Amino acid sequence: MTYAKTAAFTDEQQQLARVAKALSHPARVAIIQLLASKQTCISGDIAAELPLSRTTVFQHLQELKALDLIRGEIEGVTVCYCLNTPLLQQVYQQFTAFFIEATSTTACGPADACAC
Amino acid sequence: MTYAKTAAFTDEQQQLARVAKALSHPARVAIIQLLASKQTCISGDIAAELPLSRTTVFQHLQELKALDLIRGEIEGVTVCYCLNTPLLQQVYQQFTAFFIEATSTTACGPADACAC
DNA sequence: TCCTTATGTCGCAAACATACGTCACATTAT
DNA sequence: ATAATGTGACGTATGTTTGCGACATAAGGA
């Protein structure tokens, strides 16, 4: 997002793109799913469950944390990560609005000729 | 997506990540919105409406086309791009499923302490 | 107490991917 | 012929992915 021409787009577009970028790697998708499925807010267990090194997982976590999609609480030796559910719901609505806008087109027939 | 460890994740995770990647640039978000708003399936007009060069826009279009999110029909000199609405609806459902899964967590309280 | 082990994190770096644009070219309309 | 359009080849700048090595901290023995 820190690209040259980024400023030329609207905040909504940039915001959506930012979150999409966070989800643009299967590891991060997997991390979110893991955090959603586990009742415990695991920390190093995430690295253990993924086929990636501790360092790599840590960086993916950092990226998600930078967007505030997840939170991390220090609990003694370990860190307890968990989803920021309210933010996720908000993001969900943004995506929904986008997709509804995108799929409500009637200009071009479904999947066939582009008979503009 | 063509990264080393990509194969280790599920198809769903990879598919979601792939689409998210397509939406991870504001220019591509803008292009989809443009195609959705215009009744005509514009071609070079897209480049004219964005603060990017023709070539750059072309590459973004290629990326979207590679995922089949948009279609391009040659009409004489110009190419007529339009959204692949059915696919978008399908993608929409995938995202919905993901977000519902992600936001249904009750493990960690909303936005406060991670009291696992 | 000291040693070991586990954990989260930082620094660094190689491999790879993306963004962006200038040039070039073919096609078609005027 | 001229102009406009889509697209291809190529290059530079920038960003991402991935993990190895290193470090500090804290817990658990011996």
Image (cartoon, coloured by chain):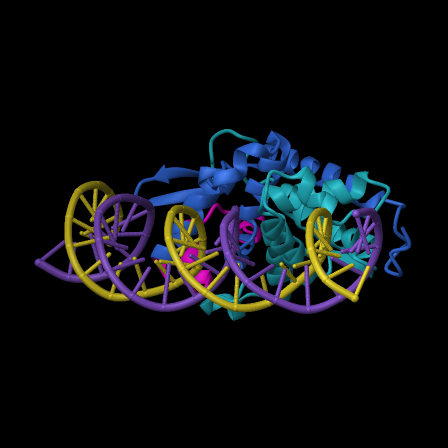
Chain colours: A cyan, B blue, C yellow, D purple
Residue B21 seen in render: yes
Residue D13 x %, y %: 36, 68
Q: How many marks?
A: 0
- From what the image shows, is residue B27 above or below residue B95? below
Residue A63 x %, y %: 63, 58
Residue D11 x %, y %: 24, 60
Identify which residue, B9 or A76, lies in the foreground: A76
Q: Magenta residues?
A: B32-54
Identify which residue, A87 or B114, lies in the foreground: B114
Identify which residue, B40 or B116, lies in the foreground: B116
Identify which residue, C12 or B22, lies in the foreground: C12
In the picture provided, is B103 more to the left or to the right than A102? right
- From what the image shows, is residue A86 above or below residue B62? below
A69 magenta-colored? no
Q: Residue at x 67, y 44 (%)?
A: A47
- From what the image shows, is residue A54 above or below residue B9? below
Q: Residue at x 80, y 52 (%)?
A: A82
Classify residue C26 by image quadrant. top left
Q: Residue at x 74, y 36 (%)?
A: B97
In the picture provided, is B42 more to the left or to the right than A45? left
B41 magenta-colored? yes
Residue A86 x %, y %: 83, 55
Residue B100 seen in render: no
